[in-house]
Amino acid sequence: MSMHREDYTYFHSIPTRWNDNDMLGHVNNVIYYSYFEAIVTKFVQEEMGIDWALAPEVPYTAENLCRFKTALKFPETVEAALRVTRIGNTSFDYAIALFSAGKDQPAAEGHWVHVMVDRESEKPVPLTDDLKQVLKKHMTT
Amino acid sequence: MSMHREDYTYFHSIPTRWNDNDMLGHVNNVIYYSYFEAIVTKFVQEEMGIDWALAPEVPYTAENLCRFKTALKFPETVEAALRVTRIGNTSFDYAIALFSAGKDQPAAEGHWVHVMVDRESEKPVPLTDDLKQVLKKHMTT
Amino acid sequence: MSMHREDYTYFHSIPTRWNDNDMLGHVNNVIYYSYFEAIVTKFVQEEMGIDWALAPEVPYTAENLCRFKTALKFPETVEAALRVTRIGNTSFDYAIALFSAGKDQPAAEGHWVHVMVDRESEKPVPLTDDLKQVLKKHMTT
Amino acid sequence: MSMHREDYTYFHSIPTRWNDNDMLGHVNNVIYYSYFEAIVTKFVQEEMGIDWALAPEVPYTAENLCRFKTALKFPETVEAALRVTRIGNTSFDYAIALFSAGKDQPAAEGHWVHVMVDRESEKPVPLTDDLKQVLKKHMTT
């Protein structure tokens, strides 16, 4: 079941780039994950307050998935949308959607699993209460 | 349950590139899909005999997924492995794994769903018997 | 000699993406060309009115160059700037610069040479007078 | 004046990837720099013995250029070739060429300028005599 724009809590506009398109004249499917990553990493940096370059604990990606529904094409601007769907002990999940401008049905939908790890040991570490609070604000029902 | 190398039927060696690595010093997770795509598109062109530039019917990607287990790093060469897991009327699925050299456990595993479409109309079309025969050869139990 | 923002006539804002950064924590130098290409292809489509997917004559890239001065870093938004520096019979040149927000000195400067070619034959064709008029508007002294 | 294969001293084979191709059905020109970077960074790591992840002094890119002569296309394997053309106090230059398999004339030629910098301060540092010796071996006349 597709979600609508109002089901998401966090947004990021991404202008497509010429070489996002592939030989078939659409945005290449690998690039959809680059858009997913753009919103996820911005969320981590700006909402969760984690500095990717310096923080001792950073989220690593454990799994992601994308379902492709309608084609995105350069030169449009894509609106990426995100919400949190699960908060675990050391990991949490997002639902992500990509919308063409002015469309209510997503061009693509997927999920992304982040595990918080210690940067040195690369072992999972528990989510702090502060981070859980931030994530809860982006969890809709 | 992880699969081993001998569970796959088709292979492709992919040297990593410097800018495959991201700020965390590993191959960026988006790039794993680029490796998936490298083996999938080579399989379509070489095993299925479909010319991506000219064929009137080409496979479009409907869904893909990746689970990240251990990090790949430039400058290693990645071995991508593929097998067919489902043959439908208009669509079919692959299982894909990425191995570091000399490792029997995959660094990443995932799946990829292809739908055969008419290039002009972009509507699904049935798989021909010839294509089903090719796919069956790569379906292992 | 570095140019300033006011020396350029056409602009495009480009939000950086997480995987634009490389292992050294800066935007990878290959990606600078992706930013160059973003503004150049947008200029061709929007100012010159050439549809990349359908036009019978399209510009091919003959040469480009970039000088890297200061590092760009995710998550900043880059302002790309362009002007035309030469209008030939079948080819024309741009100067391009990339600015960090609020900076007057460019982080990178370069050039790009486009040759108009027939899409079928891939042979150079003369620039039409209409296109030369458009290009002249973006040529500053 | 184009150089031939025998003018170069260091080589690296690079299989193209599906999404290296762009809407025009050729390898996208930005990706040529990714191939340049692949051979340059491999040369630095393997010939100069510099560990990109750990070395206190690493080369930063100051400038690069590419001239596009004939189109590369997925799924071919590209042979990248490199030689050193200048050894300065803190910087040095490479000439780079990309060849299609079995061709003696390059599909593209360019140059790349590296400046040795201290990783912490990001200031230029002199090339050691050992590094100059390595570079000299790859300087042909």
Image (spheres, coloured by chain):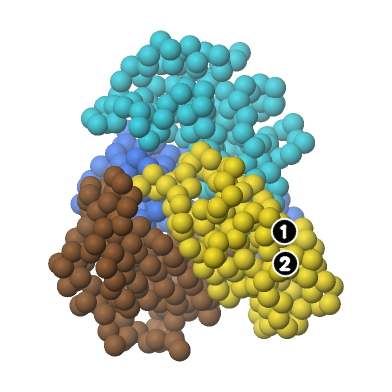
Chain colours: A yellow, B brown, C cyan, D blue
Q: Residue at x 52, y 23 (%)?
A: C47
Marks 1, 2: nearer the viewer:
2
Q: What element carries label 2?
A: loop
Residue C10 sits in quarter: top right
Q: Residue at x 63, y 23 (%)?
A: C8
- According to the picture, the residue beneath numbered tag 2 turns out to be A140
Same chain? Circles 1 and 2: yes
Residue at the limit of the structure toward the left, as seen here: B130
- According to the picture, the residue beneath numbered tag 1 turns out to be A9
Residue at the limit of the structure toward the right, as seen here: A130
Q: What residue type is labelled 1?
A: Thr
Q: Is residue C75 visible?
A: yes
Q: Residues within 10 Å of mark 1 (few under 14, many from 20)?
A: some
State the CA–CA distance, disc 1 to disc 2.
8 Å
x, y (%) of residue C34? Answer: 52, 43
Callout 1: chain:
A
Q: Which residue is drawn at 43% across and 12% down?
A: C130
Callout 2: chain:
A
Determine whether label 1 and label 2 are within 8 Å by CB.
Answer: yes
The answer to whether C17 is drawn above or below residue B101 in the figure is: above
In front of the other: C63 or A43: A43
x, y (%) of residue C64? Answer: 47, 35
